[in-house]
Image (cartoon, rainbow, N blue to C red):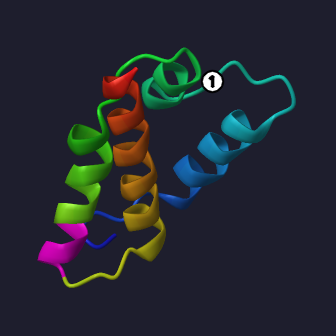
Amino acid sequence: HAAGYAPRPAFLTETRAQLTADGSPMTSSLYRDLNQGHAVEADQIIGDLIARARASATPTPLLEAVGVALKLYENRRAQA
């Protein structure tokens, strides 16, 4: 909503149900890459969300923590 586009409640309800259903195969590409030890698109995905939030002065402490964790993952992966 911070960027001016609020998702419809029905979309949120349906998406949340699909993603959290027991045995759901739906995951993000970032999550799949992370689990498989591949490079992740931290800047392109999480970094973009953080930048958009900052542009609208919206605090995002959890996203920033995720960004730090993914940077640590990328650094460890690069050293391996």
Q: Is residue 73 left or right of residue 49?
A: right
Q: Is residue 15 above or below residue 59?
A: above
* In the image, residue 55 lies in the stretch drawn in magenta: yes
Any part of residue 39 in sight: yes
Circle 1: residue type: Met
**Residue 31: % across, % down:** 53, 30
**Residue 24: % across, % down:** 75, 24
In the image, what residue occupies the spot 69% across and 18% down?
25
Q: Is residue 62 above or below residue 66?
A: below
Any part of residue 4 in sight: no
**Residue 58: % across, % down:** 29, 81
Q: Is residue 33 above or below residue 16?
A: above
Residue lying at the far front of the rendered structure: 79
Badge 1 local density, few (<14 within 10 Å), some, or many (20+)?
A: few
In the image, what residue occupies the spot 65% across and 43% down?
14
Q: Nearer the viewer, residue 62 or 52?
A: 62
**Residue 13: % across, % down:** 65, 52
Determine the secondary structure under disc 1: loop
* In the image, residue 3 lies in the stretch drawn in magenta: no
Q: Which residue is mark 1?
A: 26
Highlighted range, magenta: 52-56
In the image, what residue occupies the spot 17% across and 79% down?
56
In the image, what residue occupies the spot 26% across and 63% down?
50
Q: Nearer the viewer, residue 13 or 45?
A: 45
Main SS of residues in magenta = helix
